[in-house]
Image (cartoon, rainbow, N blue to C red):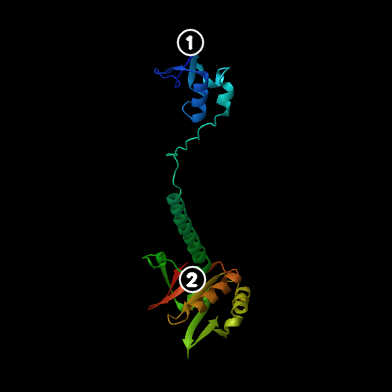
Amino acid sequence: MSFAVRHEGSPVWVDNLSAADVVTGLLDGRWEPTDEVRDDSAASWLALEDHPRFAEAAAEVEPPARKEHLDETRLDMNPLIDVALVLLIFFILTTTYETIRKVLDLPGAASKAPGRLVAVSAEDAKKFTIVVTVRQEGGLPVIKVEDRTVRLEDLDAAVLRAVVDSKKTTLLIDAAPEVDYGVVIAVMDAARAAHVAKTLWAQKKETLSTADR
């Protein structure tokens, strides 16, 4: 009995093969278990791995190594991560700046706009506000709360005492330009600790002006 073998679905085949030739071809790699075979008496093709005569030999053949195909749909996440980190740093810096600005209670640019300045006399300022003056004398800051000179370490207690005694809830800071800003911040902190409702900044021209914060 002779056999014909063809690759799966191929219209071309090799015939006049003995069973030993087919088995040898399987073991040598010439044929694969999925290739088809038929004998002289059969009209249809049958896979070698399904043929009762060659199934055992086909089972001994190692399957070919699976081909690895590159996944062209994979996204490179590195640029996206870089952009996300830049945005994260931007938001952190912006939030930090806003937090510091609120804590320091810095005068805004809008306070210098026309119509936002209120001119008052020195007498009116003393009547309705707690006046804290800061001057630089002999290289040292001189702080006065309601015309009483106080030390920097006693500033919180002095401002609180002035608020309690006068019942005023508005504080006017009259600081000279040469005064270290750290001293001004200390005055602002003292006002906040004393629960002052409003802080004003004095600007001297012909009369005393205040910039409403």
- Residue 117: image quadrant is bottom left
Disc number placed over residue 209 in the picture, else none:
none
Question: Looking at the image, is 80 positioned above or below residue 157?
Answer: above
Q: Nearer the viewer, residue 89 or 98?
A: 89
Q: Residue furthest left?
A: 114
Question: Looking at the image, is 34 positioned above or below residue 42?
Answer: below
Instruction: Please name the residue that numbered disc 2 is placed on.
Output: 200
Q: Residues within 10 Å of mark 2 (few under 14, many from 20)?
A: some
Q: Residues within 10 Å of mark 1 (few under 14, many from 20)?
A: few
- Distance from the alpha carbon under mark 1 to that under mark 2: 111 Å
Q: Nearer the viewer, residue 15 or 100?
A: 15
Instruction: Please name the residue that numbered disc 1 is placed on.
Output: 40
Question: Looking at the image, is 116 positioned above or below residue 166?
Answer: above
Amino acid type at image mark 1: Asp
Q: Residue at 60%, 77% (x, y): give it.
A: 156
Kindly tell me whether residue 135 is visible in this rendering.
yes
Q: Nearer the viewer, residue 102 or 49?
A: 49
Kindly tell me whether residue 32 is visible in this rendering.
no
Q: Secondary structure at mark 1?
A: loop
Locate residue 81 relative to residue 191 in the image: left or right: left
Question: Looking at the image, is 121 positioned above or below residue 62?
Answer: below
Q: Residue furthest bottom?
A: 138
Q: Secondary structure at mark 2?
A: strand
Q: Of the two numbered discs 1 and 2 on the same chain, state the one appearing first in sequence.
A: 1
Residue 11 lies, in percent from the top left, at 39, 17
Q: Nearer the viewer, mark 1 or mark 2?
A: 1
